[in-house]
Amino acid sequence: MVMFDSLNRHLLPTFRYQGVVLAPEGLRYSPNPDIIHPSVIETDSQWDRPLARFLMYYAPHDVPGGICLAYSEQPEGPWQEYDHNPLIASDWMPHYRVSHVSSPHAVWNPEEQRLFLYFHGENDTTRFAVSRDGVHFEYGGVAVHTGMFEPGVSEASYARVFRHNRPHTKGSYVMLLMGNHKETRKIYVVWSRDGRRWTAEKQALIVPPPGTNQMGPGWLFAWGSRFFILCYANREDSPIFDPISDLYLYEVDPDLNQVAHCGMFMHHETAGVGNARLSDPCLIQTPKRLFLFLNVGRRLRQRIALAVADME
C-alpha cells in the first residue's frame, strides 16, 4: 500500500477545532469529573420515536461508570443530557454485576431494525444491548472476551463497531477494540455477520506507532474509494497514568489485512496550548461537513469536544 507524509495534507479536509460540547460539570449524573468515548449516531424514520435527530452516548471512566445519553437536533449542539441517566448501569441483574460499565458505541442494525449498543464491563468483556428507540434497552449478551484472542491479552474493551461489507464475506460488521497484550494496548479486529456472534482475529491489527507506547481503538471510515482508521496513541515519554495523546491515521485495505501508517493526524494542542490529550475519535458525516467528536483534557478529567471540516 502507499505510504503518506506525516502531515496528511492531501488525505482529508482540514478540521477546525470548535471547543467543548459536553462536560461533566453541571450534569445531573456525574459520579466522576470525567466523561469519555463519545458515540454519536443520526436517527431516521426507521427508529421508534427517537428523542432527537442526533444521539450521543458517553460514559464516565471510573467506577461505577454508567452508559449515558445526550441529544441534539444538530451535531454542533447544544447537547442536552437525558433526564434519567444512566441508561445502563454496572448492576443489571440477572445478567451481570460488575464494578463499572463504560465505552459505549452505537450502531443501527437494519436486519433487526434495532440499535445495538456495545459497552465494556469488566475490561476483559465487551457486552451489548439492543433498543428500538435508543433509550430503553434489552440485554443482548457478551459479544467479545479476552479468551478469543492470542495468549496474553488481558483486556478486550473500548470497542467501536461499523457496518462494513468485507469483500471476502467474513462479515457485515467489524469491531475495532483495544486489547491489552502483555501490558501494551493495541488495536484488534473482530468480525460478525449479525452483530451478535463474533469471530476474532487472534493477532493485533495495529501496534503503537513509533514514539508511543499505548494506543486506543480506531474509527473506521471510507473516504472516496479508500479506507482509513483514525485512532489515538500515548507518547512514550509521558507518564502512563497521565499520558499525552495525539491522533494518528492509518490506511487499510477493504479486508483489513494490510495497514499503512500515514502519520500523526492531529496534535494534542490542537485543542489549546497545554491540552494533554486527544482521544476516542468519533467521526460523523453530513452532506456538507465532517464532524469529529473527541475527548480533550487530562486523563480522568476529560470532556467531549468537536472539530469540524467542510466537505471539499
Image (tube, rainbow, N blue to C red):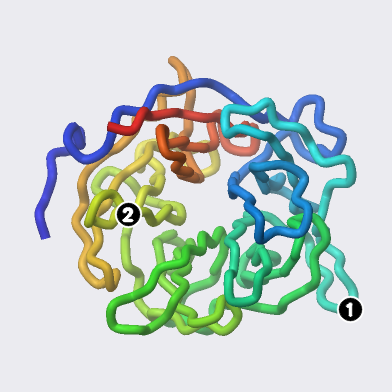
Amino acid bearing label 1: Pro
Whether 268 is drawn above or below 31: the answer is above
Q: Nearer the viewer, residue 157 or 108?
A: 108
Query: For the residue carrying disc 2, how many other residues have a C-alpha within 10 Å: few (<14), some (14-19), or many (20+)?
Result: few
Can you say which quadrant of the picture contains the N terminus?
bottom left
Q: Is residue 304 visible?
A: yes
Whether 39 is drawn above or below 106: the answer is above
- Residue 298 location (% of width, % of height): 56, 31
Identified at 83% across, 77% down, the residue is 95
Q: Is residue 66 visible?
A: no
What is the CA distance from the residue labelled 1 to the residue labelled 2? 40 Å
Of mark 1 and mark 2, the one earlier in the sequence is 1
Q: Closer to us: mark 1 or mark 2? A: 2
Identified at 80% across, 59% down, the residue is 88
Question: To which residue does mark 2 refer?
Answer: 222
Residue 29, located in which quarter of the rendered image?
top right
- Residue 126 location (% of width, % of height): 62, 70
Q: Nearer the viewer, residue 131 or 15?
A: 131
Q: Answer with left or right where residue 250 lies relative to residue 46.
A: left
Secondary structure beneath dot 2 equals: strand
- Residue 187 location (% of width, % of height): 40, 62
Query: For the residue carrying disc 1, how many other residues have a C-alpha within 10 Å: few (<14), some (14-19), or many (20+)?
Result: few
Q: Answer with left or right where residue 275 lies relative to residue 267.
A: right
Question: To which residue does mark 1 refer?
Answer: 94
Q: Nearer the viewer, residue 4 or 275?
A: 4
* Residue found at the far front of this picture: 45
Identified at 55% across, 80% down, the residue is 194
Secondary structure beneath dot 1 equals: loop
